[in-house]
Amino acid sequence: MLPDGNIGIEKDEDVALWVRCLRLFLYRVKEVLMRNVTVAATQMSCSRNREETLERAESIVRTAAGKGAQIILLQELFETPYFCQETKFEYIELAVTLDKDPAVLLMRTVAAELHVVIPVSFFERAGNVSFNTTAIIDADGTVLGIYRKTHIPDGTLFQEKYYFSPGDTGFKVWNTRYGRIGIGICWDQWFPETARSLALLGAELLLYPTAIGYNYFDKKTCSGTPDDIEHWRRTMQGHAAANVIPVLASNRIGTEETERSKIEFYGSSFITDGFGKIIASADTCTECVLTASFDLDELAVLRRKKRFFRDRRPEMYGTILKLDASC
């Protein structure tokens, strides 16, 4: 050190700066190696004005991205009101091919701009039939592929068999920029076979775009009970716990009416951790964005530690291939 001490001070400052830079570098390396991902589940109401609804959906995606979300889940068939309350041939004409769907086209542009992954649920026309489909848009705007809904309901005000053929894609998982995601669409979420199939295919996150609520078949008499929301949630919490994979569910909100009936969509969108615990939750009526972050490599280690997959006995599961195995 020189008598005035300047060189020593400068060296100390250089060392301190170098240490700070090294710590920042190691932090960034750790982030990459840990494969952290931030996800978002959303909910909103849908109107008969498709352009207006798409603007709302885009705004929600931008809000989610602003909160750091890299994978953003929108709800089922969000471009229009849930038309399956009634059976009208004119609604079948809403179906379009993948390359022409307005939501898919819009979200491809938004995904590329914001560098986010967006599964987009839409009413797909394919030849002479139509499907309830989700297109998986990667963070560069590329469509990685589609999943067509496997389980098609046909109940009071959920008359989907009139509009949708049973999906023919089988369960699928996509390697997106931020992780491997599996998709189940609404009614699929009630079947443990869906979640387990996606887990066996390598899914690291399970996503369920949804449209579910309280049914009023005469606008006065509700066919649901106060326990419906918790039943719906616990079913998917079980999928998360049994497979050690976080679950995201995105439901719509608002009341949608026809001449004879109405559905009060009850929102309650949520995100679970890998043990099935709800760590982000929405209410029944508010437009919102939920976010959560996960270390995908840590979750992979937890799955191996739990031994659920090691101890499976596929050769013993023949009964599950039958509709009725009681005889």
Image (cartoon, rainbow, N blue to C red):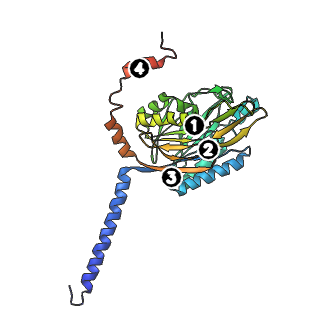
Q: Position of residue 255 (x, y in %)?
A: 70, 41
Element type at mark 1: helix
Which residue position is annotated with label 3? Answer: 69
Work out how far the residue at label 1 is from the one at label 3, CA to CA, in angstroms. 26 Å
Sequence order check, earlier mark of 1 and 2: 1
- Closer to the camera: disc 3 or disc 2? 2
Which amino acid type is shown beneath numbered disc 1? Ile
Question: Image quarter for residue 277?
Answer: top left
Above or below, 192 against 73 in this view is above
Mark 4, residues whose alpha carbon is within 10 Å: few (<14), some, or many (≥20)? few
Mark 3, residues whose alpha carbon is within 10 Å: few (<14), some, or many (≥20)? many
Work out how far the residue at label 3 is from the one at label 4, CA to CA, in angstroms. 38 Å
- Closer to the camera: disc 1 or disc 4? 1
Q: Is residue 100 visible?
A: yes
Work out how far the residue at label 2 is from the one at label 4, CA to CA, in angstroms. 38 Å
**Seen in the image, is 60 located left or right of residue 81?**
left
Q: Which mark is residue 317?
A: 4
Q: Which mark is residue 284?
A: 2
**Seen in the image, is 240 located left or right of residue 132?**
left
Instruction: Tell me what residue is drawn at x 58 percent, y 44 percent.
Output: 74
Which residue position is annotated with label 1? Answer: 229
Which amino acid type is shown beneath numbered disc 4? Tyr
**Marks 1 and 2 in Cβ contact (< 8 Å):** yes
